Image: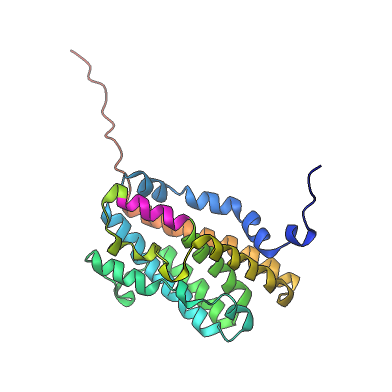
Amino acid sequence: MKKLENVDNINSLSRRLKEETAAAHERAEHSTFIVDLMSGALDVPAFIALQQQALVFYAAIEKAVEALQTDPRVAKIADRRLDRVPALKADLAALGAENDVAAIEALPATAAYVAALEEIMAEGDAAGLIAHHYVRYLGDLSGGQIIARKMTQLYGLEPEALGFYAFPELGKLKPYKDQYRETLDTLQKFLTEDEQDDMVTVAGEAFLHNMAVFADLGQVHHVPEAPNYAPHRGA
């Protein structure tokens, strides 16, 4: 007989976040820009463009974490070892690319993403910030590792240009991710049901922001369409 799952586990916040954002997560992973980048169809400038936009929105989320970490709920997930801005700046410098946030032109979708994060910070919305934090950093600790390997295999990028994906201070990543999810679950008793529902909604919106950024990047960096030659007809 199959063992019945604990009811608390079924209704856990981490499980809700994973299951109720799964469809949006799947669509984000299969965005045309990401598929092209991960298949080797693009180039190093496309990767640089991705990392520059990432620098802009990571600067925003890490500023929000710093501003709201006095909230005990935010403090529980505000591990500054996760901060990616220093690594992104170092990676871009290694690639000979602009790494000053103020000098990087944010794409429209990136600007909208940053605006959403700034609104969360201004409102002191702990649940909303934790939702964005979950999407960003748990993704980096999971799929980001695959991206790093692919960038080396496909585009010859060296480790000094891929520090964004490395978390040497965390040790083994699976135990850390498991602990992160457990921390989310302990937060449930400090969040109202409405706040938990809002968190799941905002996490889904975070994936939509990512998809929009990928779409904007795809407008600039894409696989050239094959010429549509008309068949030659003899005289």
In the image: residue 125, left or right of residue 232: right
146 within the magenta span: yes
Q: Where is residue 138 in the image (x, y as percent from the top left)?
A: 52, 63
Q: Which residues, given as a range, are shown in magenta?
A: 143-152
Q: How many marks?
A: 0
| Residue 189 in sight from this viewpoint | yes
Q: Is the magenta stretch mostly helix, strand or loop?
A: helix
Please, which residue is most extreme toward the front here? 171
Q: Residue at x 41, y 46 (%)?
A: 35
Q: Which of 79 and 61 is in front in this view?
A: 79
Please, which residue is most extreme toward the left here? 235
| Quarter of the image where the N terminus is located | top right
Location of residue 220 with respect to 124 vertically, above or below: above
148 within the magenta span: yes
Where residue 200 sits, quadrant-wise, is bottom right
Q: Residue at x 41, y 68 (%)?
A: 168
Q: Where is residue 87 in the image (x, y as percent from the top left)?
A: 35, 70
Location of residue 128 with respect to 217 vertically, above or below: below
| Quarter of the image where the C terminus is located | top left
Q: Residue at x 63, y 83 (%)?
A: 72
Where residue 213 sits, quadrant-wise, is bottom left
Please, which residue is most extreme toward the bottom here? 70
Where residue 68 sits, quadrant-wise, is bottom right
